[in-house]
Image (tube, helix red, strand yellow):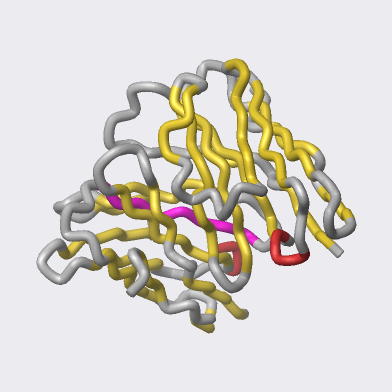
Amino acid sequence: DAGVIQSPRHEVTEMGQEVTLRCKPISGHNSLFWYRQTMMRGLELLIYFNNNVPIDDSGMPEDRFSAKMPNASFSTLKIQPSEPRDSAVYFCASRRPGQGGNEKLFFGSGTQLSVL
Amino acid sequence: RKEVEQDPGPFNVPEGATVAFNCTYSNSASQSFFWYRQDCRKEPKLLMSVYSSGNEDGRFTAQLNRASQYISLLIRDSKLSDSATYLCVVKAAGNKLTFGGGTRVLVKP
């Protein structure tokens, strides 16, 4: 079975450019999470969706960040305009419905973003 | 104070030895606890859940101390392949999982 698929694997862009990160969750999973990981701040939750609906976006740093989930099999995280401090690894993760207390997240391989 | 805190390490462990480390959490209403493992330049993967009574999975033992608000992970008979960063994860109300900064373990021959 395919896991969580993220693209691109690496993205190098210049400050001010728009960046779009993509995620395809595992089929049948109904929760999707976007995380950002840096050395300084560790793994931070940016936003998560349940049944394609954004539930908690309190982790989104600022208005430059936006996320969408138009259907159960696709989500995007957009940064516009990008800044050097956005450089990080961005992970997407999904989870099966009805897991109760067994919170097994399945992570994608991440997108390494470098903003110059 | 961070919601979930871990000693970043690294813990340098001789092969075959035992290593243990803790994770403290600030929210007394936290409901569920987990350990994830992350290899260098890879994604995190669930290692094990942490149950109130403590639980084992092979060479790994996880324990929860609600009174002092910490969880622990113990690795017995360390293998070279155990070298990784171990992430403590805490779930409060709702679906939000909060990750600690990770504890790096290096097992050496």
| For residue A93, side relative to residue A2 (left or right) | left
Q: Is residue B28 visible?
A: yes
| Residue A84 in magenta stretch | no
Q: Residue at x 20, y 55 (%)?
A: B54
| Residue B35 in magenta stretch | yes
Instruction: Pick whichever, B30 or B80, lies toward us.
Output: B30
Residues shaded magenta? B32-39
Q: Residue at x 53, y 73 (%)?
A: B104
Q: In the image, is residue B56 above or below residue A92?
A: below
Q: If the image is split into quadrants, where does the C terminus of chain B sit? A: bottom right
Instruction: Pick whichever, B75 or A96, lies toward us.
Output: A96
| Residue A43, position as x, y percentages in the image | 53, 58
Q: In the image, is residue A44 above or below residue A48?
A: below
| For residue A76, side relative to residue B28 (left or right) | right
Q: Is residue B13 visible?
A: no
| For residue B44, side relative to residue B40 (left or right) | left
Q: Residue furthest left?
A: B67
Q: Residue at x 24, y 67 (%)?
A: B70
| For residue B37, side relative to residue B29 (left or right) | right
| Residue B62, position as x, y percentages in the image | 29, 59
| Residue A92, position as x, y percentages in the image | 61, 40
| Residue A63, position as x, y percentages in the image | 61, 47
Number of numbered discs visible in the structure rendering? 0
